[in-house]
Amino acid sequence: MKWMENSFFDHLDKFANSLGYENFEIAIPLAMVPWQSPEDRDTFIMAITGAEVKGGDQDTFTYAEVK
Amino acid sequence: MASGGNRPTAPQNNPVNVSATGGNGQSGKFVAEKAAKAMQLRATGYPQGQNQAIAEQITEGGNVRTTAPAVNPTPSAANPALGNFMSEITPLDAEPTEYLPVSDGIDFGRGRGSEAISPRLTSPINQTEGVDMIKRYLPDLMNATRLQGTPDSYKRFVNFLKAQIL
């Protein structure tokens, strides 16, 4: 299986990195929202943070190990 | 000689002539109160000029007693309970004991800095809810790290969550 854009894990990656890891209690419920598109999600993130969306994209994908 | 009977104009029937100290078996205080009341009731029956004087006397108080309760009684030794009650009232214009500037709690302007504000509100209940959330979702979140093309940012986040429950 491959990492899929516009999935729960993709949403969680964007919300956790944009809002901060310590705000995971907010990031996880927001990642469960059925966003219609990544653009809608990113627009929401930029609206509440006032900054660019943070998180991995296809250009930054690597195969880091999870301990 | 026949008796004249009880004549209304007789001196003994004029309440003004009754001795205030009593006499003939009557209470002086009782008679004095009756006389004062009779004078009040006759306030409109006097010749012109006297009615106004009597009305002014009533308005100013004078010796006219009132039975109305006091609206704003003052504490007195005769009513210590009322005095204690009145002493508990705080005036609205009472000056506060401490003045704080509007910039109190902020790191600029007058007053105390941010150290005056308590740190972020954290409670054991919220911390427990966070740990429970991590324990609930962490297995699935870790499985997602094994997907092909998983970004490092996501893996760092999962490592952060693991560190929270260890």
Image: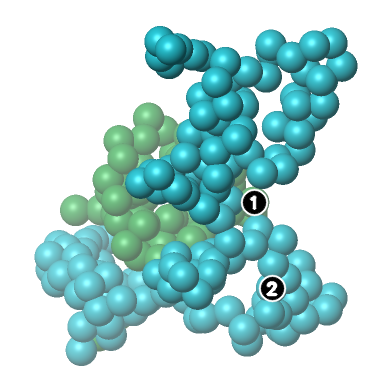
Chain colours: A green, B cyan
Residue A67: x, y in percent?
A: 25, 85
Q: Which mark is residue A50?
A: 1
* Residue found at the far front of this picture: B1
- Location of residue B6 with respect to B147 vertically, above or below: above
Left or right of B42? Residue B46 is right
Q: Neighbour class for label 2 at 10 Å: few (<14), some, many (≥20)?
A: few
Q: Which mark is residue B148?
A: none
User: Which numbered disc, 1 or 2, marks the residue closer to the eye?
Assistant: 2
- Location of residue B12 with respect to A16 vertically, above or below: above
Q: What residue appears at the point 44 percent right and 55 percent down from the top-left corner? A: A14
Say which element carries label 2. loop
**Residue A53 in sight:** no
Which amino acid, by three-letter code, is at mark 1? Answer: Gly
Q: Nearer the viewer, residue B145 or B114?
A: B114
Quadrant of the image for the C terminus of chain B?
Answer: bottom left
Residue B54: x, y in percent?
A: 75, 26
Residue B14 sits in quarter: top right
Chain on which label 1 sits = A
Residue B164: x, y in percent?
A: 27, 82
Identify residue for label 2.
B96
Residue B103: x, y in percent?
A: 77, 71
Say which element carries label 1. loop
Which amino acid, by three-letter code, is at mark 2? Answer: Pro
Q: Neighbour class for label 1 at 10 Å: few (<14), some, many (≥20)?
A: few
Chain on which label 2 sits = B
- Location of residue B124 with respect to A35 vertically, above or below: below
Q: What residue appears at the point 27 percent right and 45 percent down from the top-left corner? A: A32
Q: What residue appears at the point 49 percent right and 14 percent down from the top-left corner? A: B7
